[in-house]
Image: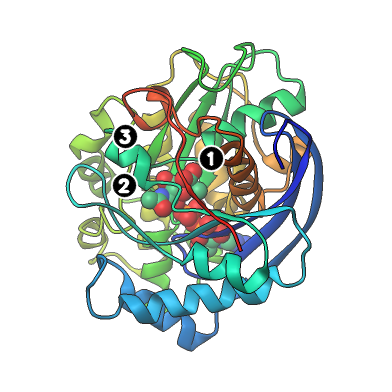
Amino acid sequence: MQGNEPLWALGMMSGTSLDGVDAAMLLSDGTRILEFGDSAYRAYSAAEGAALRAGLGLWPGDDGVAGAGAVIDAAHADLAAQFSPDLIGFHGQTLAHDPGGRGTHQVGDGALLAHSLGRPVVWDFRSNDVQMGGQGAPLAPFYHFACAQWMGATAPIAFLNLGGVGNLTWVDPTKPAPEADGALLAFDTGPANAPINDLVQARLGADMDRNGALAAAGKVAHSALELFLMDPYFGRIPPKSLDRDAFSEMMALVRELDDADAAATLTAMAAAAVMQGISHCPVPPTRLLVTGGGRHNKVMMAMIAAGLDCPVDPVEAAGLDGDMLEAQAFAFLAIRVLRGLPTSAPGTTGVMAAVGGGQISRP
Ligand SMILES: Nc1ncnc2c1ncn2[C@@H]1O[C@H](COP(=O)(O)OP(=O)(O)OP(=O)(O)O)[C@@H](O)[C@H]1O
Ligand SMILES: CC(=O)N[C@H]1[C@@H]2OC[C@@H](O2)[C@@H](O)[C@@H]1O[C@H](C)C(=O)O
């Protein structure tokens, strides 16, 4: 597997929403997207989800980490068994993220997976970046650069992932490589779906505000929104990243509101955080392409579009798959790690210099 011949990699990602694992095949030489392959999703059972939630905030060695790790290892082995990749990119599950302090913690044992599947596995993508002074996140931006080139973009565009947390990547596709100076600027914008999910879970026992229906029936509480926007995170110069629950105190701002107004206000907060993020871009993007589950939230999408001067579309408008983009990103990054290419740069994570992350485990 040396040289630069294209490889079929399987990328697997379990995101902050803790709903399940996405897996996607990608053919790439580590710089270009050559072909998209099959993809699959495996939902966590209620018991698996509970074990993962119990692990949130835990660090290596803490009680409860092994249980969460076992769920991740079994679910990923189960899902990967239906594919025949040359190699696997295994993100695992982030349990805790504190890049300026204790580091970043993903569970998932790549050596075990390599052994059980009989294929090379690239994993532990974030630690090296944090050790080199970076945020360890976001890591999808190098893949976003490849997506922009695959689309034939000729002017700066931005990708927005609306997952549990939101993250934005500004791309200048005219630069020669993702690690080139000025090619990328990336950072977490703020909370996106996680607080909305937490609200509807606590009040209505629901998983999500499907399509933004509840928010559509409510009014935004502007005083709460203004208080939220006073958080110093929004003024901080990127790169910057967030733990899933970094904004948990925002729930207090909507406590007195009825369900619909609370949902509308949390949705407006997520959208306003994106606007704040866009203001940090070197030049405004000519197009904003949205990935992640939040692209289905019509209210959130409309609020974002209303605040920007450029078209705002789901990534499907550009021929990409918004459910699988992050899984594809870890397939792409796995090939880069195998080839010794960097996976993050000062503009994406704040790392001192472009660096490759990830351990390689062979069967
Ligand atoms: N139809 C829908 N309407 C509204 N919201 C939706 C819809 N579908 C998904 N979502 C939201 O998107 C979330 C899942 O998004 P996604 O799968 O992108 O998150 P993730 O990958 O786990 O998170 P992250 O990218 O932060 O790691 C759901 O929990 C829900 O809040
Ligand atoms: C530490 C961590 O797991 N961060 C995730 C999380 O989910 C979204 C956002 O916060 C982003 O920073 C990152 O994931 C994506 C896939 C990334 O690294 O690009």
Q: Nearer the viewer, residue 204 or 45?
A: 45
Give the mark nearer the N terminus: 3 vs 1: 3
Q: Nearer the viewer, residue 20 or 330?
A: 330
Q: What amino acid does circle 3 point to?
A: Gly
Badge 1 local density, few (<14 within 10 Å), some, or many (20+)?
A: many
Q: Please give the residue where the numbered disc 2 appears in the rendered image.
A: 242
Check residue 99 in the rendering and tell me which mark sits there, or answer none.
Answer: none
Q: What amino acid does circle 1 point to?
A: Ala
Q: Is residue 216 visible?
A: no
Query: Which residue is painted at 53% across and 34% down in the image?
Result: 141
Query: Which residue is painted at 43% across and 36% down in the image?
Result: 274
Q: CA distance from mark 3 to mark 2?
A: 13 Å
Q: Please give the residue where the numbered disc 1 appears in the rendered image.
A: 140
Badge 2 local density, few (<14 within 10 Å), some, or many (20+)?
A: many
Q: CA distance from mark 3 to mark 1?
A: 14 Å
On-image quarter of the N terminus: top right
Q: Is residue 27 visible?
A: yes
Residue 148 in percent (x, y) is at 67, 26
Q: Check disc 2 and report its element: helix, strand or loop.
A: loop
Q: Check disc 3 and report its element: helix, strand or loop.
A: loop
Q: Is mark 1 within 8 Å of ligand 2?
A: yes
Q: Is mark 2 within 8 Å of ligand 2?
A: yes
Q: CA distance from mark 1 to mark 2?
A: 15 Å
Check residue 134 in the rendering and tell me which mark sits there, or answer none.
Answer: 3
Label 1 close to label 2 by CB (< 8 Å): no
Viewer-nearest of discs 3 and 2: 3
Q: What amino acid does circle 2 point to?
A: Leu
Viewer-nearest of discs 3 and 1: 3
Which quarter of the figure has residue 190?
top left
